[in-house]
Image (cartoon, rainbow, N blue to C red):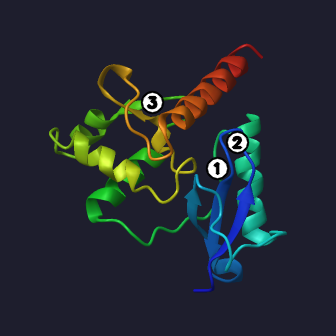
Amino acid sequence: MGAMRWAKVPSPIGEIGVAVDGDGADERVCGVQFQGAPPGRGLVEEPDGLLAAAAEQLTEYFEGTLTEFDLPLVVRSGSEFERKVWDRIAAIKYGETTTYGSIATELGDPGAARAVGIACNHNPLPIVVPCHRVVGAGGKLVGFGGGLPRKVHLLELEARVTIEAAFR
């Protein structure tokens, strides 16, 4: 495992930080954060390789030209339950949503909606693993690690792109 490298990605919801670790063919995207890239060690001013590809895909996502990320990912944290939640979230299609309760039920514990929400909050790869597509019962917008205004922006972006694609 190589040293973690970070890039800054400007976006309409603020600077996004994206990180990769590993070397060469073993590189994997390991982090996305809404607070931007951490200052100092590991920050790459001119990303290359997978780091550049990840930054480009995030940019294309915000431009509305990319609807499915194609990046090798690695997650090194999380409980077994959190990893199951993240796997389920990764399967939510662009422009669609599901509820915390639905995921809890699918995972065999209908009473675990709150735990699903906590797992979403711990997601190390937001946007790429689209936790913003998980909403409260009845479609209510509740809790989001990046803040509700960011969640609204992401959902509105995907809705707009989906509607525009239907009329092409």
Q: Quarter of the image holding residue 64?
A: top right
Image vertical order of residue 109 relative to residue 64, above or below: below
Q: Is residue 96 left or right of residue 37?
A: left
**Residue occupying the point 48% across, 60% down:** 124
Horizontal and vertical percent position of residue 134:
41, 36
Q: Quarter of the image holding residue 94?
A: top right
Residue sitting farthest toward the right: 46
Marks 3,2: beta carbons within 8 A:
no
Q: Earlier in the sequence, mark 2 or mark 1?
A: 2
Horizontal and vertical percent position of residue 58:
70, 49
Q: Which residue is mark 2?
A: 61
**Residue occupying the point 39% across, 47% down:** 88
The residue under label 3 is which amino acid type? Thr
Q: Which mark, residue 143? A: none
State the separation of the CA atoms marked 1 and 3: 17 Å
The residue under label 1 is which amino acid type? Phe
Horizontal and vertical percent position of residue 164:
72, 18
The local secondary structure at tag 2 comes to helix
Visible residue check, residue 65: no
Q: Which residue is mark 3?
A: 97
The local secondary structure at tag 3 comes to loop
Circle 1 Cα neighbour tier, 10 Å, few/some/many (<14 / 14–19 / ≥20): some
Image vertical order of residue 101 relative to residue 115, above or below: above
Q: Which residue is mark 1?
A: 69
**Residue occupying the point 52% across, 51% down:** 126
Q: Is residue 145 left or right of residue 23?
A: left
Q: Nearer the viewer, mark 2 or mark 1?
A: 2
**Residue occupying the point 62% across, 78% down:** 4
